[in-house]
Image (cartoon, rainbow, N blue to C red):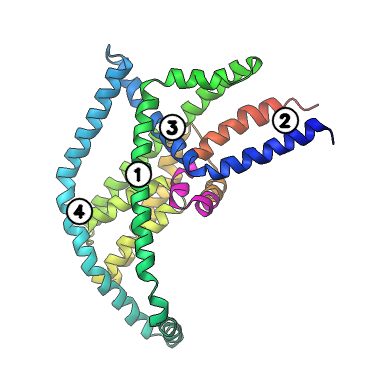
Amino acid sequence: MTSKTILAVLSCVVLGLLIWHLRWVLLVLFGAVVLAVALDVLIMQLQRRSSLNRPQALMVVVLILVLVGVLIAQLLLPELVVQIQQLGKDLPQLVSKISSMLNTDPRLTELEKTINGELNLDKLQPIGAQLLGVAGGAANSIIQLFLIALLAVLLALDPSSHRGMVLAVTPRPGRDQMAQLLDHCRDALGGWLSGMTISALTVFLFTWAGLVLLNAPLALLSALVCGLLTFVPTIGPTAATLLPAGLALLQSPQLMVYVLIFRLVLQNLEAFLLTPLLLSKTVNLLPTVALMAQLCLGALLGLPGVLLALPLVVVLQVVMQKVIVQQVMDQWT
């Protein structure tokens, strides 16, 4: 091995270690980029229909988003608070009902005895420390969200300067290709965000309407959870169905079956019709790739990694297509 090869290997190792130690900083930065792209889409739409410059358009967009958030909070928050309080009362009843159902099957009774035998006082003592850890993690998440929002506003305020900074550190022969790559990544990410936002809003409204028609309990809260978890494909919609199905079980098993059928139909329509239609002109993610990305980033970074897995895969897919495939594989002789 030559000295240049050894130096290159050592540089890659040091760079990898640096990225690993700064993974949370990079995660916050990427989250800010995703939010900045979402703001940029709205800013460009506003600038096309007005004579506002970018700072003015950004201020208008942020103001509109704040006003819409306040309006939605005024309309939905009182009902959500009531339903969350009701959920706290219903959960013990749901656990009791599931336990009674387990007691009807002898095989499940043995399982319940085994579980109850393992839950002794000595094993329950560390729960207080775990709760403190959860509280600390929640505070840390709030700080991270604030930093993401602040960085996103700064990025959206002057994206050309940040884009120029990336181009400046790119070798001169590759600057045109880097500029095109940044444009493709921005278009793909913006299209994915727009499509998923419309899909999540549609799922929220239809789930709310369907659960109300079925007289399911806590319809608004369940619909909100289902809509938000639409941004986590494959895993999210399935996990979101557990809440309305469990709450419906408190009333009757028949209602639970109706809720499961309704959510199954709606989930398949969203996954196989609505989302592909919205994303057909921007990005097409394979379900296997999306699921593996969520599992890998979830194992490495926890919940934030799961939430940002899909935007990251969108960007990496563009990089793979434009760089690895077109510039390397297609040129292979």
Tag 1: residue type? Ile
Q: Does the magenta-highlighted stretch encompass residue 21?
A: no
Tag 4: residue type? Leu
Q: Which residues are magenta?
A: 295-311
Screen quadrant of the C terminus: top right
On the image, numbered disc 2 is attached to which residue? 329
Tag 2: residue type? Met
* Mark 4, secondary structure of its residue: helix
Q: CA distance from mark 4 to mark 3?
A: 31 Å
Screen quadrant of the N terminus: top right
Please state which of the two labelled residues, at mark 2 or mark 3, is closer to the viewer: 3
- Whether residue 307 can be seen here: yes
On the image, numbered disc 1 is attached to which residue? 143
Residue 203 drawn at (x, y percent): 33, 46
- At label 4, counting other C-alpha atoms closer than 10 Å, the crowd grade (few under 14, some 14-19, many 20 or more) is some
On the image, numbered disc 4 is attached to which residue? 80
- At label 1, counting other C-alpha atoms closer than 10 Å, the crowd grade (few under 14, some 14-19, many 20 or more) is few
Left or right, 283 with respect to 329, comes to: left
Residue 141 drawn at (x, y percent): 37, 48
